[in-house]
Image: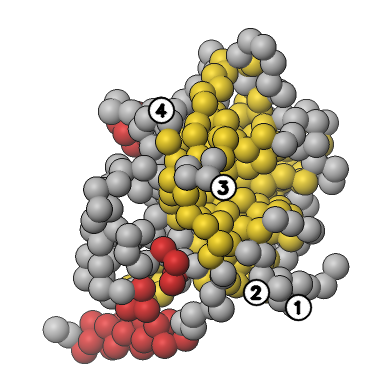
């Protein structure tokens, strides 16, 4: 190996070593209950949200339906709420990403809905990862409602791409949050690089602010060792976002590979505090030893606590259970610490 290559390898290892040694586990959330979800035939729980008093869920394997959840003492049950898709699906993505999504869609859903948000008027907003688009659904009625794609600023893609976002098929938009009163919408880019994007409502469009769409873009890695040896013997994993929620004037991100929930500044995207749920989901019977990455994809947070939903991707636990699971955590008593209105 040449001297130049050796120097480059040494520099890479120094950066990687610094990244690993800098990782520190966040304080643990207190688990109150863990319940399975029945009635979502193909599983793949991707998002949760409470809209007008109803608990809704999204599966990334269903293109034209939501699920209304009811809780019992032993489980959640899901009832299908169908909706009508628009006849056309506009997208700002380049051909190579659309082609990859099309190939994935040959064996399953084409739209890959990954996030859910709702506003005070009962409208629901679904983010499509494969199209980098947002579908708006009006409040439910007796007949299936018709969805409409939001008119998103194309700079959402170009600015993000320039910052290293939107680089990989099936690793694009993974979450959505909305502050309808302020006319603000946020998207979470999943990984390599992960990021937070902000759009403002102007007329019939959602535009990038003058300062730009991208609040945060970062490509970092963290060690798998604190989370046990079951992650296919990998030494490091990329940091990622698997959901985002707007609550109490802050963004809250679900960080799947780090097994944590973080509170972030909605203006800058910068992290303020984090809380871990690793000790709850990485123990039997909830641990999936063959999972190559974290499985938490759905986040719900309100005054009653924090709910994290697992997308097990049809994997069976060691006890044979194939259902998605929802974990209920107490809202940490110090959640306001470091909070600046």
**Residue at position x 54%, y 19% from top?**
82
Mark 1 burial class by Cα count in 10 Å: few <14, some 14-19, many 20+: few
Which is closer to the viewer, label 4 or label 1? 1
Mark 3 burial class by Cα count in 10 Å: few <14, some 14-19, many 20+: many
Residue 338: mark: 1
Image quarter of the C terminus: bottom right
Q: Give how far apart the Cα atoms at labels 3 and 1 are.
A: 25 Å
Q: Are marks 4 and 3 in contact (CB under 8 Å)?
A: no
In the rendered image, the residue lying farthest to the front is 73
Q: Give how far apart the Cα atoms at labels 4 and 3 are.
A: 17 Å
**Mark 4 or 2 closer to N-term?**
4
Q: Are marks 1 and 2 in contact (CB under 8 Å)?
A: yes
**Residue at position x 64%, y 16% from top?**
145
**Mark 3 or 1 closer to N-term?**
3
For disc 2, the marked residue is 273
- Residue 12 shown left or right of residue 289 in the figure: right
Mark 4 burial class by Cα count in 10 Å: few <14, some 14-19, many 20+: many
Image quarter of the N terminus: bottom left
């Amino acid at each position: 190996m040449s001297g130049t290559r050796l120097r480059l390898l040494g520099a890479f290892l120094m950066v990687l070593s610094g990244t690993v040694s800098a990782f520190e586990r966040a304080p643990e959330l207190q688990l109150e209950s863990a319940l399975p979800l029945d009635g979502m035939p193909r599983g793949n729980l991707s998002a949760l949200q409470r809209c007008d008093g109803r608990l809704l869920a999204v599966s990334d394997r269903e293109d034209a339906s939501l699920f209304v959840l009811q809780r019992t003492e032993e489980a959640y049950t899901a009832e299908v709420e169908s909706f009508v898709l628009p006849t056309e699906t506009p997208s700002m993505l380049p051909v190579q990403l659309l082609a990859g999504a099309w190939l994935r869609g040959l064996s399953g859903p084409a739209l890959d809905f990954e996030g859910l948000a709702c506003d005070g008027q009962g409208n629901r907003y679904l983010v499509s990862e494969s199209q980098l688009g947002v579908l708006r659904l009006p409040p439910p009625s007796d007949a299936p409602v018709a969805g409409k794609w939001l008119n998103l600023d194309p700079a959402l893609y170009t600015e993000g791409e320039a910052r290293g976002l939107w680089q990989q098929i099936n690793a694009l938009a993974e979450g959505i949050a909305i502050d309808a009163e302020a006319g603000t919408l946020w998207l979470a880019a999943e990984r390599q690089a992960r990021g937070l994007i902000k759009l403002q409502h102007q007329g019939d469009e959602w535009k990038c602010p003058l300062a730009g769409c991208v609040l945060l873009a970062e490509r970092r890695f963290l060690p798998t060792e604190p989370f046990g040896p079951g992650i296919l013997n990998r030494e490091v994993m990329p940091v990622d976002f698997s959901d985002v929620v707007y609550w109490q004037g802050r963004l809250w991100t679900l960080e799947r590979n780090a097994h944590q929930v973080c509170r972030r500044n909605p203006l800058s995207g910068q992290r303020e505090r984090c809380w871990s749920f690793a000790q709850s989901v990485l123990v039997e019977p909830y641990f999936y030893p063959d999972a190559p990455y974290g499985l938490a994809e759905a986040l719900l947070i309100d005054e009653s606590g924090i709910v994290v939903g697992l997308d097990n991707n049809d994997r069976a636990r060691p006890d044979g259970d194939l259902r998605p699971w929802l974990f209920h955590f107490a809202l940490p008593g110090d959640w306001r610490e470091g909070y600046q209105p």
